Amino acid sequence: MGKWSVLSLPIDPAANELLGRSPLALLIGMVLDQQIPLEKAFSSPYVLQQRLGHPLDARELAGYDPEALTAIFAETPALHRFPKAMAGRVQQVCRLLVDRYDGDAARLWSEAKDGKELLKRVSDLPGFGRQKAQIFVALLGKQYGVQPSGWREAAGDYGVEGSWRSVADIVDEASLVKVRSYKQQMKAAAKAGKA
């Protein structure tokens, strides 16, 4: 179902390359993509792999000692602003991958029969509300060729071509600027609505 390619975020080329060849790294990047810059979130799987000293493995992370994993996340520079919470979240996601998909992150999307099922599978992940799930469906469809029937509809506004709403639309520095501008407009509108 589609091609697997290299994401082109404005981050270390080796981190991009890992996101392009490791479905688990991509998923972990999406897990971490909250309350920190997306460049940090999507670079952290590469740093995590370096700290572990070998390729990322869902089974290993699912069974890792929680305190030891938190220590790895907290090592300077920390992989996230909230290393303990996010180490726990990554571990929860990996446990679900082991329980439902035999530890293979790609099966999360490769076995979905349509966009609606894909969205449900992603929404079932710990920490993935509707918006985050739709962004990940859009990212898979736009950047990785994971396009089961109805994927754009399942992704909602994030699935619209050229919408510049999320990481799904970032392919270079210019598109990053457009996405940041959109997010700033949304924050300003939300703030104005509360005033």
Image (cartoon, rainbow, N blue to C red):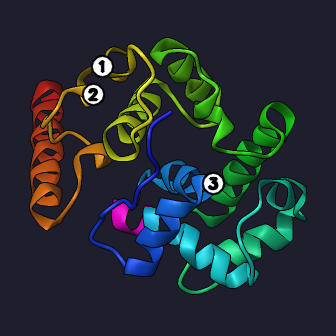
**At 67% from the left edge and 45% from the top edge, which residue is drawn?**
105
Membership of 39 in magenta stretch: yes
Give the residue number, with chain letter if any, for mark 2. 159
Q: Residue 149's x, y, as percent?
A: 41, 15
Residue 165 appears at what percent x and percent y?
20, 39
| Residue where numbered disc 1 is placed | 156
| Number of numbered discs overlaid on the protein picture | 3
The magenta region covers 36-41
Q: Are marks 1 and 2 in contact (CB under 8 Å)?
A: yes
Q: Gap between marks 1 and 2, in whole Å?
A: 6 Å
Measured along the vertical axis of the image, is residue 174 above or below residue 184? below
Mark closest to the chain's N terminus, 3 or 1: 3
**Residue 50 forms part of the magenta stretch:** no
Residue at position x 59%, y 60% from top? 22
Spatial distance from mark 2 to mark 3, Cα to Cα?
Answer: 22 Å
Asked whether the residues under the numbered discs 2 and 3 touch, taking CB atoms below 8 Å apart as contact, a structural biologist would say: no
Contact between labelled residues 1 and 3, with CB atoms less than 8 Å apart = no
Q: Mark 3 points at which residue?
A: 24
Determine the CA span between mark 3 and mark 1: 24 Å
Residue 50 quadrant: bottom right
Residue 83 x %, y %: 62, 66
Q: Label 3 sits on what residue type?
A: Leu
* Left or right of residue 28: residue 188: left
Residue 62 at least partly seen: yes
Mark 2 residue element: helix
Query: What label does residue 187 carry, if any?
Result: none
Question: Principal SS element in the magenta part?
Answer: helix
Residue occupying image coordinates x 78% and y 35%: 101
